Image (cartoon, rainbow, N blue to C red):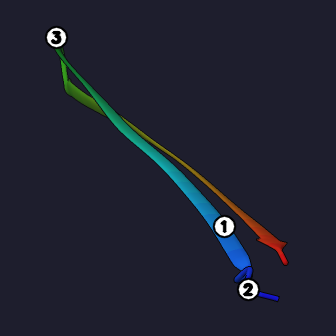
Amino acid sequence: RASKPHCYTLTHTHAHSRTHTQSYTHSRRHTESYTHTVVHTQSYTQTQSYTHT
């Protein structure tokens, strides 16, 4: 056999990060401070291997 084994590897990585910060300050008789932080992280990894002899 003169044919060599063929290996095929595919790796796909997707990462998404989003940060949202909202600040609200209200002052009338007293001072109110409001801070809202949202952090969203999504990671996706796919590995596919194919071997043909």
For image coordinates 62% across by 60% down, the residue present is 10
As helix, strand or loop, the secondary structure at mark 2 comes to loop
Give amino acid for label 1: Tyr
Looking at the picture, which amino acid does disc 3 mark? Arg
Q: Please name the residue that numbered disc 1 is placed on.
A: 8
Q: CA distance from mark 1 to mark 3?
A: 67 Å
In the displayed structure image, the side of residue 22 where residue 39 appears, left or right: right
Amino acid at pointer 2: Ala
How packed mark 1 is, by other alpha carbons closer than 10 Å (few <14, some 14-19, many 20 or more), is few
**Residue 48, percent from left and from top:** 74, 62
| Residue 28, image quadrant | top left
Mark toward the start of the polypeptide (2 vs 3): 2
Residue 43 numbered mark, or none = none
Rendered position, 25 above or below 37 = above
Residue contact between numbered discs 1 and 2, judged by CB atoms under 8 Å: no
Query: Left or right: 1 with respect to 17?
Result: right
What element does badge 1 sit on? Answer: strand
Asked if the residues shown at circle 2 and circle 3 are in contact, with their CB atoms under 8 angstroms apart, the answer is no
Q: CA distance from mark 1 to mark 2?
A: 19 Å
Disc 2 or disc 3, which is closer to the eye? Answer: 2
Residue linked to disc 2: 2
Q: Which residue is mark 3?
A: 28
Q: Earlier in the sequence, mark 1 or mark 3?
A: 1
